[in-house]
Image (cartoon, rainbow, N blue to C red):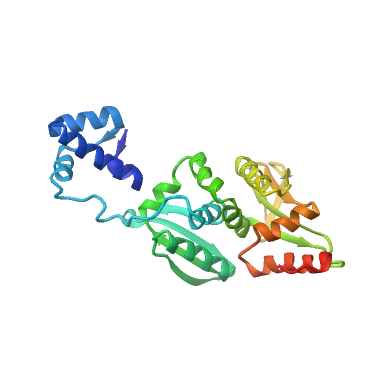
Amino acid sequence: MLRVKDLGQKELEELVNYVRGLRNYGLSYSEIVERVLIEKGVKISKATVLRWCKRKHEPFNKIKLLDLSPSPALSYILGAYFGDATIGIGQKYKYRIRLKVVDREFAEAFAKALEEIGANPRVGYENDSTRVGRWYVESTTKSLYMFLKQPKDALFEVAKEYPREFLRGLFDSEGYVYLDPTTKKVSYVSLHNYDLELLEFSKSLLASLEIHSKIRVSKKAGSPVVIRGKQYSYKSDLYELRVYRIESVRRFAKEVGFTIPRKQNKLREWLLNKFNEHL
C-alpha cells in the first residue's frame, strides 16, 4: 500500500486528476477514498480528497515540476546516475541527487543537464584530507528522486531514445581510455561495474551505434584488493565492458566520446597517430 508522499511527479498528477474525475461523476469523498485504495493501492485521507476537489490545496505547490520526458539531458543524467551519481533522503525529507567527481568539466556537464530539465543544481568544490579534492553537484528535487527510483527497465527505455547521451554519461563516470604509451597507435575504451545487466544493456546500445564491445569478468568475488593501504576482497564479481576493435574505437570517439578532456584527448591523440584524423 502506497502513501501520497511515495508517489512520483507523474503518478501524483494522474492521481489528482483521477480523484477529481471521480468527484465529477458524483462519488462522495468517502467513496473516493475507498476507490483509490482498491484501484490504485494508495491510502489517502478524506480531508486530502476534499482539499483536492475543492482546489483548496494544490499538491504541486511544494514540488518543483521538472521536464521528465525523454531528452538528451535526461538520458545523460541517467548515464551518470548508473555511474557516479547517487540519490538519497537527507534531513527534513530533502530528496537529493548528488555527484562528486574530480573533473570540473564533468560536474559542469551534469549541472547543465539538470538545468535543462528544470532542476536547480548547486555546484561547488570541496577538499578532502583523505583523497584528492572533488567537485560536487547537488540538486534537491523529489520529482527526480522518485523518477530515478523507478525499476531499471523503465529508465532504460529513456536511454534507448538517446543512446549517445546515456553512454557518454556512463563512460564519463566510470570509463577510461588506454593508449599505448610507446606507439600511441593502440587504444581501447573500457569501464568496470558490478551490474552485469547494466553492462549488457550498454553493450546493446553500443551495438545500435555499430560499436562492437565485449564483457568479461575482471575480478572474481573473493579476489584481494588493496585500497588506501588496506587489503579487502571483492564481495561479488566485477565486470569489464571493453571497446577494442579499431573501427569500433574510432566510432566510439566520434559517436559517443567523453565530456572530460583528459579522457577525450587520449582518443584524439590516438586518432591523430593512427589515422592522421582529428576529432
Residue at (39% x, 61% y) in the render: 119
Rendered position, 110 above or below 87 = below
Can residue 271 be seen from the camera position used here?
yes
Residue at (24% x, 55% y) in the render: 61
Left or right: 196, with 141 as reference point: right
Rendered position, 244 above or below 136 = above
Q: To which quarter of the image does residue 268 belong?
A: bottom right
Q: To which quarter of the image does residue 40 belong?
A: top left
Residue 245, image x and y in percent?
79, 51
Rendered position, 132 above or below 204 = below
Residue at (45% x, 53% y) in the render: 87
> Residue extending furthest top?
38
Residue 277, image x and y in percent?
77, 67
Residue 72, image x and y in percent?
51, 56
Can residue 44 be seen from the camera position used here?
no
In which quadrant is the N terminus drawn? top left
Q: To which quarter of the image does residue 54 belong?
A: top left
Left or right: 215, with 106 as reference point: right
Left or right: 267, with 164 as reference point: right
Residue 10, image x and y in percent?
35, 45
Most foreground residue, 12 or 272: 272
Residue at (51% x, 63% y) in the render: 110
Most foreground residue, 145 or 92: 145
In which quadrant is the C terminus drawn? bottom right
